[in-house]
Amino acid sequence: MVNIASQLEGIIQVVPKKVLSLTDIDYKPRPSKWSKKEILGHLCDSANINHKRFVEILISKEPIVISGYNQDLWVQVHQYHSKFSVEEILNIWTSLNTQIIYLLSAITDEQLELQCKTEEQKAVTLEWLVTDYLDHMNHHLKQIIGK
Ligand code: NI
């Protein structure tokens, strides 16, 4: 997991500067569509949710069932668009991912094979889940800063 941990480390080192240089961070194309600031808030929610999943998989004796979450409502209740500055969201995002990086860098190859079940009862490994976390982040970062 050192590989993904170091990829994440690289991301949190370069992304904040790029985000702070954006001029369209607050732009909401439609009321129902997330602004870039809200997408960043969604990445904080994803970090929270996934961090908890990773820990529970590591400490549970039995394979856990991971449940989904209502992403739009999470963004809405936090009021990322109206209450938060970009700097505040970036600080939260960086802190949460720092915690995840330290967690991941201590995970052994054996632990990567630990299983959990999705809501649809599909069996997946911790490695799959961690990779999915990074892919999801990269997908949204592309929407925010391009490339
Ligand atoms: Ni998403």
Image (spheres, rainbow, N blue to C red):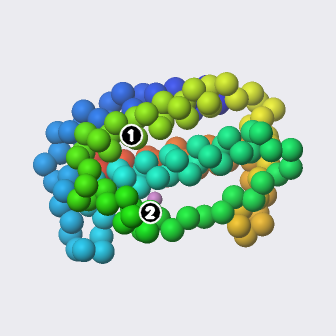
Seen at 34% across and 36% down, the residue is 91
* Residue 103 numbered mark, or none: none
Residue 94 in view, yes or no:
yes
Give the residue at mark 2: 74
Q: Position of residue 88 (x, y in %)?
A: 29, 41
Q: How many C-alpha atoms fall within 10 Å of the one at disc 2: few (<14), some, or many (≥20)?
A: some
Query: For residue 78, what is the image quadrant?
Result: bottom left
Residue 36 in view, yes or no:
no
The secondary structure type at the circle numbered 2 is helix
* Residue 79, above or below 130: below
Q: How many C-alpha atoms fall within 10 Å of the one at disc 1: few (<14), some, or many (≥20)?
A: some
| Disc with the residue nearer the chain's start (1 vs 2) | 2
Q: Report whether 146 appears left or right of 127.
A: left
Residue type indicated by callout 2 = Trp
Q: Position of residue 15 (x, y in %)?
A: 32, 36
* Residue 109, above or below 77: above
* Residue 99, above or below 41: above
Q: CA distance from mark 1 to mark 2?
A: 15 Å
Q: Residue 31 versus residue 139: which sits nearer the camera? A: 31
Q: Residue 14 versus residue 88: which sits nearer the camera? A: 88
Q: Position of residue 79 (x, y in %)?
A: 32, 60
Seen at 56% across and 64% down, the residue is 69
Seen at 32% across and 44% down, the residue is 89
Q: Report whether 83 appears left or right of 49.
A: left
Residue type indicated by callout 1 = Ile
Give the residue at mark 1: 92
Q: How many marks overall?
A: 2
